[in-house]
Structures are given as structure tokens and as C-alpha cells.
Image (cartoon, grey):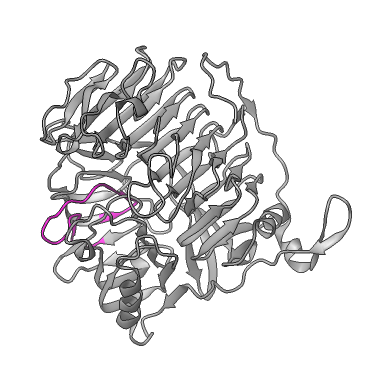
């Protein structure tokens, strides 16, 4: 991969050429397809069953609670386990349910509207497995359900990579564990909480295009965009950053039942969105029948996955772990690649796991990419180098797409995600170089860069990027925007010399290149916890050129327990952190 540009770029947009969609229905009716050399090969079939790790319930299913409890018992503390599950509930009403959700478990309703599937009960995440500390409650999700909580308040005590999407809670929502131990940041989208949301000890949170009956408190960074009932903008005290609308959003695709037929609903793009997409019933969008998907199951290889895409099929990854020895290439506009149950892709032999062409409307969603032991230069690439097509009418989106380097075993990647295509939407990602588990250490899971954005007009809503050896985020494209950023610098830096960046003490968590003329960010925090060498000094959390078009709102840095210190918040602006207290240093607006 070429080094990033160091001089201002001149980008000339070109309109992507239109092309006819492949006739998927025709492909379904013939058993063979032709290669470029004319020989016939077996066509990849679309549709089929959802595999053994998707459990589908209806209100008459016997002992639902017993099955849900059985899976939770297996997954409660299986932080780096290999099992993956999706618990899917057909439309109807379910009484006396308490679905506790552990690692690598997705729970979802199968209606077109969250109100189609109602629990008189709860969907619960707590932290009993970790002595009441919720800071490692990762990799799980709740989607497309209505809850009538037994106590009046549902508990969802999570940290990163645990989205709460398209949910309707007819009561309150508690984001902290029992006993109010720490929790470290999460995400709500397209959800309606009739009562109050109580963060309590939750350190930071991002809520998008939703409705809340109230918001209880804030610790360091609570950010809202397009949220009816959100508190007024008041950062830093209370630490609320509130935007009336979200400039551009498109909700995540989801599986649902149309009668007895499975389909995937793909919501339309919204501009200046506010409130849920489903308030008036059926949201705007497109339904795609399951027979237009290659239903990927464990054991599938990259060659078959690529053949399916080339054939004109979308991808539905069932819960499982997938090793790929070649890159999954998605070069067809509007392709949906949707994972269920935290479907996990591991690249072997140092390949890039997923590459998306410079085409419009690709949707990557619900996937975890886990770096392999052989270094990959990149793990996900959106658009080739120097991509220039205009995708503003139909952006590519990444939603609940997570990356992990180490933790489940040794893993290495130079750069995790590279976005070259213009107009891309990054909606909720956690890009994580492991700081615990197995296969981690300053060089063991070496990963220099988290996210690099070269494309113009890229929007990130809910950007969680942590622990990289150098820059966590680098931004080279024009007119980039980030709404909510959460970061911790690498815990395991052995000494000051290891992080020294020329004359600068440490690499910024979020760096906008000097060539950039326009960029804007809201609600952004970087934290340090240098527990190997607590004397390490980090020069600043953020770095950006001082130009009229480069603006930041509600920035903060925190030294956790005094393990390392920041000298400034952004560039040379902002007071230093000092001492053992976790009181943030803040900059309300820059410049």
C-alpha cells in the first residue's frame, strides 16, 4: 500500500457510469454459469435455510426461556470463544421472557416494524460474570423488538460493539450494570425509549435518530444527533453535545418475515434525519427476497463467496467463523453483505478480508473482521486507491462492522480500515487492537493505524477506534465529518521512546492532515492509560490544521488514574491532565 499523501490533493469527481443490474431471477433458473473463458461452472444457489446457529422462535415454541438461558450460559463469559448465535423471534407477543444476551449473540424480531414483535419482559445485559464491571461487555446486539420491561426499566449495560437498534422500550433504559460498576460506551440508533435513559456510570454514549423520554445524567461524553427528547447542547457541564439532525443516515439492513418468506429490508438514505424511521409504520426502502442472497454457512470459502457476488447474488453470512484465503471482492453496486450473530471473517496468509469497488450503494453490516497471525496490509478497503466516483446519491455504508487485532489469538494488520470512496457512511464501528485476552503485546499484535480516510465527503457516526501503535484515525479527504469519537491510546507502550513521533510526544488519536481545507467533528474523546509506563507523556489527543474550514466541537482528553498524561487536548490548545484523578481536560470549540 502506498504511503498516504503529504501534499494537498486535487480530486476531480466523475459520475459513476450506470450499468444494468444482473438478472438474478434468470440465474436462479439455470444450474450453470459461464466463465470468461467460456467454460460452464456450477452456479451458486441462492436462498436456503439459515443454518444451525440461527434459532427461530414463535409464540407457541415450547420452553423459549430454557433455550435462551442455555445459549446465555454458554456465551456469558465466552469473550474470545468461537460460537456465534442469532435468536430470531417471529411477529407476535411473548410473555414472561428475560433474554439475557452474552457474547456473539444477536437477538432480533422478524417483523418489518419493531412493534410487530413484543416481549412482555426484558432483553438484559449485566456484568455478573465480570464482578459487576461492564467495560468488557462487547460483541452482541438487540434489534427490531418492542419491550414491556417487567420492572418498568430494561437493563443494557454494555461497552463497545453492542448496538441497540430499531428497539421500542415501553419504559426506561438503564445503561449501567447492577451495582453501578463502570461501563465504557455504547450506541443506540433508530430506537424509541418511552421513559428515561439512565446512563449512571456509563462513561460515554452516542444516540442517533431516535426518541427518548428523558436522559438522566452524563459522565464524560454524551452525544446525540437527530434525537427527539435529547437534552440541550451544554458541553462540558453537563457533557451533552446535541445536534438537531443527522446530516445523512441510512439504517442497517435487516432480516424479516413476509408471511412465510424471508426477506432482507434495505432502508433508504435519509437526509437531516430526526426521530425513528418507522414512526409512521413501514419505513421507506427496498425488500430483497432471500433467494437473491447466497446464504453463507461455516465452511464456505472465499472463491465461492466471490463467485456468488459475480453472479449477482447478495451475501447473508449466518453466525459462524469464516477463514478466507483470498479477498472477498464486492464490485457490484448495491450489493448487501449482511452478517447475523456477529459473523466473523478471518483473513489467512496476510490477505485483505474485504475490498469494495468504487461503486455505489454497497452495504456492509453486522460483520466482525478478526486479523490473522500473518500481517495484512489492510483488513477492509472501501474503494481502490485514487477512487473518484460521485456516490452522494447512493453512498456505500459500513454499519456494525467491527475489527479486532489480537485478543482471540495473535493477529497483525498495518491499517485496519481504509476508505477511498467518496461519500461513504461509517455508522458505528469499533476498531480495536486488543489490550487483553491472548496474542497481544506491543509487537505481538502490531497494528500501526486504525482507520484512514482518503475519500471526500465521508461521514462517521459513532466512531470507536482504540489502542493502535501509531495513529488511531488519519483523515486526508475533504469535507469529512465525525459525530462522536471514542478512543483509548495503546495501554502497552513500553516507554516514551516507543511512541515518540519525531519531535512530538506520541501519535494523536485523531489526526486531520495538513492538506485538508474542510473538516468538522462533534463529541470526541481520547483517553490514556499507560499502565506499563505511567510516566509517558502524550503531547495531545487531536491534531488538525488551523484553517477556517476545520472545526471541532466538544473535545476532551482523560488520563485514567494518572497512568500517563496529556499536555494538550488539540495541537497546543487545552490544559494538561495531571495527577491521578480522571477529570477530563476539555476544549468546547476549535479553533
Residue 137: name its quadrant.
bottom left
The quadrant of the rendering that contains the C terminus is top left
| Image height of 440 relative to 51, above or below | above
Q: How many marks?
A: 0
Give above or below for 138 relative to 85: above
Q: Which residue lies at the image location 70% right of the left edge and 49% below the top edge?
A: 21
Image quarter of residue 17: top right
Up the image or down, 44 lies above or below 464; here it is: below
Q: Position of residue 48 (x, y in %)?
A: 61, 72
Residue in view at x 68 percent, y 58 percent = 308
Tell me where the magenta segment starts and ends, as one range: 169-192
Q: Nearer the viewer, residue 389 or 168?
A: 389
Magenta segment's dominant SS is loop
Q: How far across and how far down the image is residue 60, in percent?
A: 37, 85
Task: Please tell me which residue lies in front, 87 or 4.
Answer: 4
Residue 253 appears anywhere in the view:
yes
Amino acid at each position: 500500500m502506498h504511503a498516504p499523501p503529504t501534499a494537498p490533493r486535487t480530486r476531480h469527481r466523475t459520475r459513476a457510469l450506470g450499468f444494468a443490474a444482473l438478472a438474478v431471477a434468470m440465474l436462479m433458473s439455470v444450474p450453470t454459469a459461464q466463465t470468461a473463458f467460456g467454460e460452464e461452472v456450477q452456479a451458486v444457489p441462492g436462498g436456503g435455510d439459515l443454518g444451525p446457529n440461527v434459532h427461530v422462535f414463535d409464540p407457541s415454541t415450547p420452553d423459549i426461556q430454557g433455550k435462551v438461558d442455555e445459549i446465555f450460559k454458554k456465551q456469558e463469559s465466552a469473550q474470545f470463544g468461537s460460537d456465534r448465535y442469532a435468536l430470531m423471534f417471529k411477529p407476535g407477543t411473548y410473555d414472561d421472557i428475560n433474554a439475557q444476551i452474552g457474547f456473539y449473540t444477536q437477538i432480533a424480531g422478524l417483523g418489518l416494524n419493531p412493534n410487530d414483535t413484543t416481549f412482555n419482559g426484558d432483553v438484559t445485559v449485566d456484568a455478573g460474570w465480570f464482578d459487576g464491571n461492564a467495560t468488557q461487555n462487547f460483541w452482541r446486539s438487540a434489534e427490531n423488538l418492542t419491550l414491556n420491561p417487567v420492572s418498568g426499566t430494561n437493563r443494557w449495560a454494555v461497552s463497545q460493539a453492542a448496538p441497540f437498534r430499531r428497539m421500542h422500550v415501553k419504559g426506561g433504559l438503564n445503561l449501567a450494570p447492577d451495582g453501578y460498576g463502570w461501563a465504557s460506551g455504547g450506541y443506540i440508533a433508530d430506537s424509541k425509549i418511552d421513559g428515561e435513559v439512565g446512563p449512571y456510570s456509563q462513561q460515554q454514549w452516542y444516540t442517533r435518530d431516535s426518541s427518548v423520554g428523558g436522559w438522566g445524567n452524563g459522565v464524560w461524553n454524551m452525544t446525540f444527533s437527530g434525537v427527539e427528547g435529547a437534552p440541550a447542547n451544554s458541553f462540558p457541564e453537563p457533557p451533552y453535545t446535541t445536534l438537531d439532525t443527522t446530516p445523512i443516515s441510512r439504517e442497517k439492513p435487516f432480516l424479516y418475515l413476509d408471511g412465510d418468506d424471508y426477506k432482507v429490508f434495505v432502508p433508504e438514505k435519509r437526509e437531516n434525519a430526526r426521530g425513528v424511521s418507522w414512526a409512521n409504520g413501514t419505513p421507506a426502502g427496498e425488500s430483497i427476497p432471500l433467494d437473491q442472497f447466497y446464504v453463507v454457512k461455516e465452511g464456505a470459502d472465499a472463491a465461492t463467496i466471490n463467485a456468488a457476488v459475480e453472479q449477482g447474488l447478495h451475501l447473508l453470512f449466518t453466525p459462524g467463523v469464516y477463514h478466507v484465503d483470498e479477498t472477498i471482492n464486492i464490485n457490484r453496486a448495491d450489493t448487501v453483505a449482511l452478517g447475523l450473530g456477529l459473523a466473523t471473517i478471518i483473513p489467512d496468509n496476510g490477505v485483505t478480508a474485504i475490498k469494495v469497488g468504487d461503486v455505489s450503494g454497497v452495504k456492509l453490516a453486522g460483520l466482525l473482521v478478526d486479523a490473522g497471525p500473518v500481517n495484512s496490509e489492510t483488513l477492509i478497503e472501501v474503494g481502490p486507491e485514487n477512487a473518484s466516483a460521485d456516490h452522494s446519491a447512493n453512498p456505500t455504508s459500513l454499519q456494525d462492522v467491527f475489527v479486532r487485532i489480537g485478543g482471540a489469538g495473535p493477529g497483525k494488520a498495518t491499517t485496519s480500515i481504509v476508505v477511498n470512496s467518496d461519500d461513504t457512511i461509517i455508522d458505528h464501528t469499533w476498531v480495536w487492537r486488543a489490550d487483553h485476552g491472548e496474542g497481544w503485546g506491543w509487537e505481538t499484535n502490531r497494528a500501526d493505524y486504525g482507520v484512514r480516510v482518503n475519500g471526500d465527503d465521508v461521514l462517521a457516526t459513532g466512531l470507536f477506534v482504540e489502542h493502535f501503535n501509531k495513529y488511531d484515525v488519519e483523515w486526508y479527504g475533504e469535507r469529512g465529518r465525525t459525530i462522536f469519537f471514542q478512543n483509548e491510546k495503546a495501554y502497552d507502550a513500553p516507554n516514551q521512546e516507543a511512541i515518540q513521533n519525531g519531535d512530538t510526544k506520541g501519535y494523536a488519536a485523531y489526526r486531520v492532515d495538513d492538506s485538508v481545507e474542510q473538516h468538522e467533528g462533534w463529541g470526541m474523546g481520547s483517553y490514556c492509560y499507560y499502565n506499563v509506563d505511567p510516566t509517558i507523556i502524550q503531547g495531545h489527543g487531536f491534531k488538525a490544521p488551523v484553517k477556517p474550514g476545520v472545526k471541532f466541537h466538544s473535545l476532551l482528553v482523560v488520563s485514567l488514574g494518572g497512568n500517563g498524561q496529556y499536555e494538550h487536548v488539540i495541537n497546543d490548545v487545552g490544559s494538561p491532565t495531571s495527577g491521578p484523578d480522571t477529570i477530563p481536560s476539555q476544549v468546547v470549540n476549535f479553533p
